[in-house]
Image (spheres, rainbow, N blue to C red):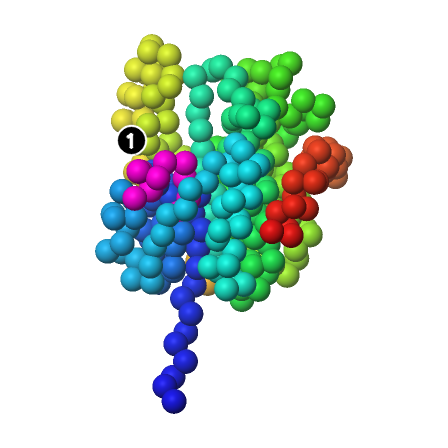
Amino acid sequence: MGERKEMPRTAIVTGGNSGIGLAAAKALGKKGYKIWIAGRSAEKGATAVARLRPHCPAGVEFLPLDVTLFAGIEQFVRTLKPQLGGRLDALVHSVGVVGNGKRVVSADGLEEGWATQFLGRYLLTEAFTPELSNADDGRVVFVSAQAPKNPRLFEDDPSLEKNFTIMRAIGQNQSACVLYEQMYAAEHPNGPAINGATAGLVKNTGINRSLPGFIRAISKGIFAVFGITVEQSATNVVALASDPALKGVSGYYFSKPQNVQKRQKLAFDEERVASLRRVLAKYATVRSALLTT
């Protein structure tokens, strides 16, 4: 009988069509991971797969995912779970959106930023926790903006129907992310590990395209002078997803790209975490459905 072939490690990278997600997928592919990238555009997905294939000897595939729709998340989970064989080594959340200052709502009544920057990430993490738990060293990575010092949630109106401003939305989304990372790490002391990493000021990601003209021009200059490449931004992300030296590190926020020593333990007071729990209770039915998918 021939020797049993060892199964490759596996990784899901949301937002893997471009930018930091594409850079992270490429680096993980080079490390021998089987990669699934996820995004809205099938055309961009096909282009990304073609670019990634030479760097992913274990394989790379694209699956459509619209995190602003509960049905889109459910379809993604339903399609991918059978392909994982009961195990997932890394889940990297790099999908993101920057609006033009106007409130955009999905068919499910979700504000676009809330759904993309937090809620979709939360639901996917919960859905794939059984597979992550079956890995020897399952990892979850949230790519985001800087962690707030005083997280704040709008419990009665998380989609900001009554109080929307772009800055309030960004603040709430990031608040929810760091509170969830802290909560998840506490609930899973033996893994899967979960951490957050700042993207930093990244060149050529298109993140400022939707900004007003004057602000866009200023930001373009700032990004050109002080920005880093997507590969540099992805350095910590890839390390958090795969570096054996970081095994067991969980519940931290990594605040400086390319420096895994620059980190802070997330330790917000329990009332702030309780606030997040009350918000998440609104989505308990959706979460339960995903866990039985």
Is 2 positioned to the left or the right of 174 in the image? left
**Which residue is at the far bottom?**
1
Q: Which is more toward the observer, 220 or 52? A: 52
Determine whether 123 is above or below 211 in the image. below
Occupied quadrant, residue 228: top left
| Amino acid type of the residue tagged 1 in the rendering | Asn
Q: Residues within 10 Å of mark 1 (few under 14, many from 20)?
A: some
Q: Quadrant of the N terminus?
A: bottom left
- The verdict on residue 277 being magenta is no
The part of the chain drawn in magenta is: 37-46
Is 51 positioned to the left or the right of 188 in the image? left
Determine whether 103 is above or below 56 in the image. above
Q: Residue at x 38, y 55 (%)?
A: 35
Residue 244: horizontal and vertical position, in percent? 46, 63
Is 286 positioned to the left or the right of 165 in the image? right
Q: Which is more toward the observer, 185 or 111? A: 111
Residue 127: horizontal and vertical position, in percent? 59, 49
Q: Is residue 233 at least partly visible in the picture?
A: no
Q: Residue at x 28, y 50 (%)?
A: 52
Helix, strand or loop under label 1: loop
> What is the tally of numbered marks visible in this picture?
1
Q: Residue at x 42, y 42 (%)?
A: 64
Occupied quadrant, residue 152: top right
Residue 183: horizontal and vertical position, in percent? 67, 45
Report the residue marked by disc 1. 204
Q: Which is more toward the observer, 33 or 235? A: 33
Q: Is residue 129 at least partly visible in the picture?
A: yes
Q: Residue at x 51, y 39 (%)?
A: 72
